[in-house]
Image (cartoon, rainbow, N blue to C red):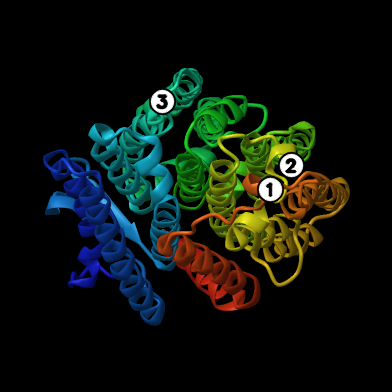
Amino acid sequence: MEHHLNLVHNIPFFSIFFAMFCGIITPLIKNGRTARRLHGFMVLLVGALSVVLLVNVTQNGEAFTFMMGHFPAPWGNELRVGPLEALLAVLVSVVMFLTITGGSDIIFKEIVPEKQNFYFIMLNATFGAMLAMTYTNDIFTGYVFIEILTIASCTLILAKGTKQAIVGTTHYLVFGCMGSGLFLLGVCILYGITGQLLFPQIKEGVAALMATGEYHFALMIVVSLMFVGLGIKSALFPFHSALPTAYGSTMTTSSGILSGLVLKAYIILAIKLTFEVFTIQTLVDLKIADVMFVLGVLGMVMGSVYAVKESRMKRMLAYSSVAQIGYIFMGIGLGSVAGMLAACFHVFAHAVTKSMLFVCCGAFIEDAGGKEQLENLKGAAHRNLLAGIAFTVGTLSMIGVPLFAGFISKLYFAIAAVEMTGLRLILVLAALAISMILNAMYFLPSVIAIWTRPKEEGEETTKKAQVSPTFALAMVLFIVVNLVLGIGYRPIIDVMKLGIELIQMTL
């Protein structure tokens, strides 16, 4: 692993610092639109720097650590950067920028002017926390930013200020604190039996404990606590009940950020822990992989079953997220590199697609006068053609139609399953088939509804919506990114493979 520093190696630290710094100075900005411009500039700058970082580490085939303040362990903490982390940082930047760009009009309509700058403070904190969890090489730092992300997420849900938003925030906070508490308890026990906080040193300690059999039960408890905690935070079935209430009661912009990115931040940390701390083999030996596999498969099916029964679009999308999170945990639970690769790609596919769907949903509901029942959204695609096209693209991707991002992730899940034998192979293929059918059962009626003109057409039902240039730009770019992931996926897969290989070689 390279340890010399250059300007490129400072990009991860600068990205986190700049996001947090913008959050600190935003209270000085009283105008919400000015705060919006600062946020957009910050995300664009971090995104551009992340692309530079990605190109650099990929071309050089390197992974490096950045020692914060140049203090060695155990006093200091580190960031670790390789192709996988840099690629994830690009994803976070792109989805954050497009979601806020597409939903800006909703933000300024639904949040009172004196609180708009506070909303962007929390967006900056959310963005910085997700970057920190992507880059961290220190388990306690990971916990700290889990808590920051939890608080910021609750504020995003509460921003609308309605009674329903307060209930949704309370429900979300209770589950969030439960997940954080379990994760912290696991960290404390792990520190007690290894005496380390940095990932590489913890990994050495865990490997020694697994080899000698010492603290075997304690280690199993540690891994269980940490992964259950992250499972609760990421709404893994059956810990999902806070999601529909929270997402259904808040602005669709917040829902897009929470579903597309915040849930993925906890999963990204789980993937990092799997590779950089415990290893896939340790999860298999401790039977933790089996538990994640079972819960993932159940989530794939049950999340879709709940979505089929739902008649409100935002809640339907929330239950769909439960199903898609199940895909990711099923991939991790396969206990193979191929399964992890499929899970990583589905993080990308779902982040891009679900954020787009929520932004489109917000446009439909606004045009319908705040009504979100599917029967009230008939003809929505005719009132807002671009949103209708983007929503249709998103549903096809989630179902798994070729040429779109969702198809590629499901293809790689099937490829990973072929490496398995016996019951696990059958379960994966059956779950994929059942889930895709159920996806079609609730997504296609939604598409049909928005493209069906109401029987009694009046001025209100036929009036074209005014589409802002920022919304149009976001929708076009969302569609392009989805097609890039669905058609030009090979370079992205190659970068992921390189990142995984470097983690296994260097740690």
Residue 73 rendering spot, x and y as whole percentages = 21, 45
Front position in the image: 260 or 211: 260
Question: Mark 2 is on which residue type?
Answer: Met
Question: Mark 1 is on which residue type?
Answer: Tyr
Q: Are marks 3 and 2 in contact (CB under 8 Å)?
A: no
State whether residue 474 appears in this view.
yes
Q: CA distance from mark 1 to mark 3?
A: 29 Å
Q: Quadrant of the N terminus?
A: bottom left
Q: CA distance from mark 3 to mark 2?
A: 32 Å
Q: CA distance from mark 1 to mark 2?
A: 6 Å
Q: Quadrant of the C terminus?
A: bottom left
Q: Which residue is mark 3?
A: 189
Residue at the limit of the structure toward the bottom, as seen here: 59
Q: Secondary structure at mark 3?
A: helix
Q: Which residue is mark 1?
A: 327
Q: Which residue is mark 2?
A: 300
Front position in the image: 43 or 226: 43
Q: Earlier in the sequence, mark 1 or mark 2?
A: 2
Residue at the limit of the structure toward the front, as seen here: 459
Q: Nearer the viewer, mark 1 or mark 3?
A: 1
Q: Are marks 1 and 2 in contact (CB under 8 Å)?
A: yes
Q: Are marks 1 and 3 in contact (CB under 8 Å)?
A: no
